[in-house]
Amino acid sequence: MENLIDTFGEGPILFGLALCIGMVFGAAAQHSRFCLRAATIEFSHNIWGPRLAIWFVAFSAAVCTVQLAIATGHLDVSNARQIAAQGSLSGAILGGLLFGSGMILARGCASRLLVLSATGNLRAIVTGLVLTLTAQASLRGVLSPLRESLGGIWTISGGRSRDLLAHIGILPRTAALVAGGCLLLSVVFALYRGNAKSRTGAAVIVGASIAAGWIATYAVAQNAFEMVAISSITFTGPSADTLMGFVNERELPMSFGSGLVPGVFLGALLMAVITKEARIQRFEPQMPMERYLLGGVMMGFGSMLAGGCAVGAGMSGGAIFALTAWLALLSMWIGAVVTQRLTEGGPRVRPAGTCQQS
């Protein structure tokens, strides 16, 4: 790694690693139909169905592989932003609720919208752009004062205070063993609910990609001359930075985030082409455009307030047991379930064994 960094520099190495990891994640997410929104809809209908099972497989795989990497000394997340920096409990709660509600209205979270965009879903492309612009406005633009005010209501110091495992006194190897058991049960559950072996396996790869992101950035940070922040897969921040890079720069800045977004898009596109699932999908009369746009705005602001999206906070942050990430994920579930039940006139879950394109 040190020789590669000496030859190419940290930026291009991070970009290349993110591109590869993103392609794997995108292809696996497309094939497995990994989607938090679909899982919450089944849960809101008291259905323990195939999409809920797929989400549990991916989440368990993420926690298991990340904690295994920590336990074996291949990863140290003590300096990760989700652990080391000051966090916001109010931001995690309010942002998570907004994101979960917006996810239902827009029929997909940030990662799912990106994956669907690659398959030709025009609804996802438009909604994703709205989400990205809102996230940028929330991070550095006109909405940033509101985000800072809400996030400052209830804060928590960085370090041990944000480490959930430290609070409950569990070592990484124990967390890895428990998550491994949950993963095995989730795989059995997914197969029992009618998921094909290939889709279930793809869900495992989705979770393992989270660990790959953490390990890759950690390896670069350990050998880099400049300060490199360790991170894993997340979408709202990198999507906003990538869009602004295309708009404001002659050349796209090389970073992990800027490589991740095109990587996921290419991976999902290749999988959609291979499986012959790529097709143009437009806005439908029964699903008005304003619902998607409102959902995109809520997710863009909510993700910046919560410290990440359903994957960035929920999977990447959850896998390292960041307290605010687990709180944000729980709030996303609550916001999604409540919104789905309040909008029951919308599309309902299909029977087990079928997959619905968002």
Image: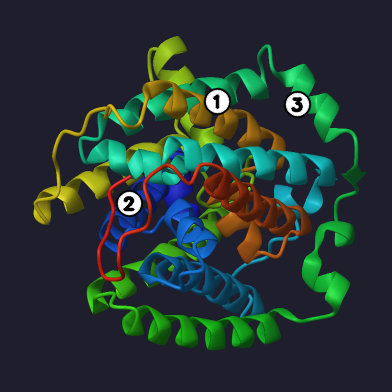
- Three-letter residue code for mark 3: Arg
| Residue assigned mark 3 | 147
Residue 26 numbered tag: 2
- On the image, the x and y values in percent for residue 216 come to 50, 57
- Three-letter residue code for mark 2: Gly
When the figure is inspected, residue 68 is found, relative to residue 339, above or below; the finding is below
- On the image, the x and y values in percent for residue 222 come to 62, 56
Q: What element carries label 2?
A: helix
Q: Residues within 10 Å of mark 2 (few under 14, many from 20)?
A: many
Residue drawn at x 25%, y 64% is 354
Residue sticking out furthest to the front: 345
- Three-letter residue code for mark 1: Val
| Residue assigned mark 1 | 297
The foreground one among 116 and 356 is 356
Q: Label 1, label 2: how many angstroms apart (C-alpha)? A: 23 Å
Asked if residue 253 shows in the view, the reply is: no
Q: What element carries label 3?
A: helix
- On the image, the x and y values in percent for residue 339 come to 58, 44
User: Is 59 left or right of 338, judged from the image as shown?
Assistant: left
When the figure is inspected, residue 41 is found, relative to residue 302, above or below; the finding is below
Q: Based on the displayed image, in which of its 4 quarters is residue 346 positioned?
A: top left
